[in-house]
Image: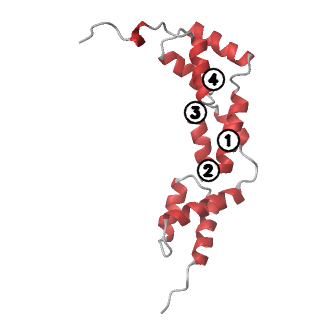
Amino acid sequence: MNNSPSRAQNRPKPSAKAKAVDLLSRSDQSVRRLTEKLARKDYSEEEIQETIEWLQEKHYVDDEAGCKRRFEYLYESSGYSVKQICAKLMQKGYDSSLVRSCVPDDIYDRELEKAGRVVRSKFKPGADFRKMQQYLYGKGFDYSAARDAIEDYRQEWPEEEE
């Protein structure tokens, strides 16, 4: 058995800047999330702060632009409710006021469409109204959009024969 240290153990620790750039090359990061990740890698507060400032000067990290980009992507391409999108972005380290500023004024039509897709994919015709409603509320859909999506779905069901 070889008792010599592995090559990974012999490698010097990369600088905080190098590590941050590596993390950013994989995906957008909020300042808070990037700070947390660097702290977990045992970089000093001073080195982290210096790195964040450098990244901001170089426009490699920008919470406002990153949050807006992620919000728009999820809003357009996902089946998530706006409430779920906001929660996901806050989990990624974006400030709640910044996240809320991305939400359009009128989201009803979008919520109705997404809630309709979700309810059709999850429930068979004839399913209990309250179960569907509870499921959509649990997914963060607005009350009126959820109710209307369920009603639209129920209108598609064939009339029950007597």
| Residue at the image point whose x is 49% and y is 76% from the top | 126
Residue 61 against residue 162 in the figure, above or below: above
In this rendered view, identify the residue nearer to me: 153 or 4: 4
Residue 40 picture location, percent across and down: 48, 18
Local SS, label 1: helix
* Percent coordinates x, y for residue 88 in the rendering: 57, 40
Mark 2 — residue?
78
Q: Quadrant of residue 98?
A: top right
Q: Earlier in the sequence, mark 1 or mark 2?
A: 1
**Residues at marks 1 and 2 touching, judged by CB atoms closer than 8 Å:** no
User: Mark 4 belongs to which amino acid?
Assistant: Val
Three-letter code, disc 1: Phe
Spatial CA distance of label 3 from label 1 is: 11 Å
Mark 2 or mark 3: whose residue is earlier in sequence = 2
* Residue at point 63%, 23% (across, down): 31
Residue 92's tag is 3
* Circle 3: residue type: Lys
Q: Which residue is mark 1?
A: 71
Q: Residues within 10 Å of mark 1 (few under 14, many from 20)?
A: many
Q: Residue 109's x, y, as percent?
A: 71, 60
Local crowd at mark 4 within 10 Å, few (<14), some, or many (≥20)? many
The amino acid sitting under disc 2 is Ser
| Residue density around tag 3, few if under 14, some if 14–19, many if 20 or more, within 10 Å | some
Disc on res. 31:
4
Q: Secondary structure at mark 4?
A: helix
Can you say whether 85 is above or below 36 in the image? Answer: below
Proximity of marks 3 and 4: CB atoms separated by less than 8 Å:
no
Question: Percent from the top left, x then y, of residue 129?
Answer: 51, 70
Of the residues under marks 3 and 4, which one precedes in the sequence?
Answer: 4
Which numbered mark, 2 or 4, is in the foreground of this view? 2
- Mark number, residue 100: none
